[in-house]
């Protein structure tokens, strides 16, 4: 850390939060969203929880950010971001990448390129856009063909989310090991953190910290990788509460259509599907779905952790051997 940076205060930002503009891509017949929080509610809650700056990372959209700015006007403590769903065509592995401090034209280009994670990474690097590879442990339930292939993708991004508030500690530990592996290869990497909150309950429980004085210097520190992740990993009870809250808000939204999420006549099919699945939604589906997903992620994380730990040991031995030869 430079002398000038030592005099700067810590700025905290929850770099992974969602609003009602995040859509649920699975089970399309239900036309559900994976979050029903209003952008203004998310913004206020983040500030109340001690965040110095606020951003939203909705899935493949910046509409939540634009809604807030349209309602509130220019905000010095807010910047536009999104979580881009992308894919590695070589392995079929899907990744989520948060891009920060973007504008509408950069959003459109990121969406155009998201079918190939390498093309996306090249564009973001060329544009100087801070980008973080999110919840890698969760993404790798379906593994890449090799660890080297995975590292090629990870190395394309200057930031990695090492603390996600919706991921188990074992999953976050995988991201930390990936960061250490990059550093063992001589590539510096910044560590980001965010709550991955899909309700307002966990906003600000996990965050990113940097030495900065305002939005611009924070984004500069983010791009340079001079950031660290802090806060909580997932706890089962709050995650289950989130799941049931989202289900309840889905049914309320389906009945009232308060925010006009459904076009005229569009509610018939979702309503029929929701009615049939109501007993499952009320009793078992959120809990079993959440716990099953967590179990799969935990198994994948343990396997990848073993591979990474072995790789790090081998790298350390190679460095020691080279030092002895020299």
Image (spheres, grey):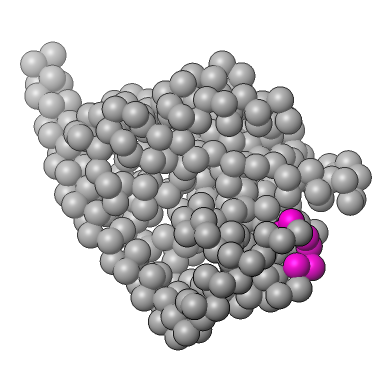
Task: Report whether residue 124 is seen.
Answer: yes
Q: Nearer the viewer, residue 178 or 154?
A: 154
Magenta stretch secondary structure, dominant: loop
Residue drawn at x 17%, y 37% is 311
Q: Nearer the viewer, residue 186 or 88?
A: 88
Q: Quadrant of residue 319?
A: top left
Relative height, residue 258 to residue 160 (above, below): below
Q: Magenta includes 137?
A: no
Q: Which residues are magenta?
A: 257-263
Percent position of residue 49, x then y: 70, 65
Q: Quadrant of residue 180?
A: top left
Residue drawn at x 35%, y 64% is 293
Percent position of residue 84, x then y: 54, 39
Relative height, residue 25 to residue 169 (above, below): above
Task: Report whether residue 207 is seen.
Answer: no
Residue drawn at x 13%, y 20% is 322
Q: Using residue 70 as the reference point, say whether residue 20 is left or right of it.
A: left
Q: Using residue 144 as the reference point, say whether residue 77 is left or right of it.
A: right
Q: Quadrant of residue 145?
A: top left
Q: Nearer the viewer, residue 111 or 267?
A: 267
How many dots with numbers? 0
Percent position of residue 296, x then y: 28, 61
């Amino acid at each position: 850390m430079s002398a000038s940076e030592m005099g700067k205060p810590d700025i905290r930002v929850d770099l992974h939060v969602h609003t009602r503009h995040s859509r649920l891509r699975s089970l399309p017949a239900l036309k559900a969203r994976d979050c029903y929080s209003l952008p203004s509610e998310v913004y206020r809650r983040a500030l109340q929880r001690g965040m110095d700056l606020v951003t939203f990372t909705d899935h493949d959209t910046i509409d939540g950010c634009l809604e807030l700015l349209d309602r509130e006007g220019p905000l010095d403590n807010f910047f536009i971001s999104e979580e881009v769903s992308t894919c590695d065509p070589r392995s079929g592995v899907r990744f989520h990448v948060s891009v920060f401090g973007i504008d509408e034209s950069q959003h459109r280009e990121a969406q155009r390129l998201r079918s190939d994670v390498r093309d996306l990474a090249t564009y973001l690097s060329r544009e100087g856009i801070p980008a973080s590879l999110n919840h890698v442990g969760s993404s790798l339930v379906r593994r890449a063909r090799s660890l080297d292939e995975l590292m090629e993708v990870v190395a394309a991004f200057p930031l990695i989310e090492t603390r996600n508030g919706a991921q188990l500690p074992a999953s976050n530990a995988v991201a930390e090991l990936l960061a250490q592996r990059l550093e063992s290869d001589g590539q510096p990497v910044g560590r980001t953190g965010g709550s991955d909150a899909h309700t307002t309950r966990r906003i600000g429980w996990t965050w990113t910290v940097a030495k900065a004085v305002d939005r611009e210097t924070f984004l500069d520190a983010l791009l340079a990788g001079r950031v660290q992740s802090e806060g909580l990993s997932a706890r089962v009870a709050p995650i289950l509460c989130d799941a049931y809250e989202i289900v309840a808000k889905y049914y309320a939204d389906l009945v009232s259509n308060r925010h006009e999420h459904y076009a005229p006549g569009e509610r018939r099919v979702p309503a029929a599907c929701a009615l049939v699945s109501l007993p499952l939604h009320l009793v078992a589906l959120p809990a079993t779905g959440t716990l099953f997903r967590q179990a799969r992620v935990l198994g994948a994380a343990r396997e990848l952790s073993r591979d990474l730990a072995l790789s790090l040991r081998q790298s350390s031995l190679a460095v020691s051997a080279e030092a002895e030869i020299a």
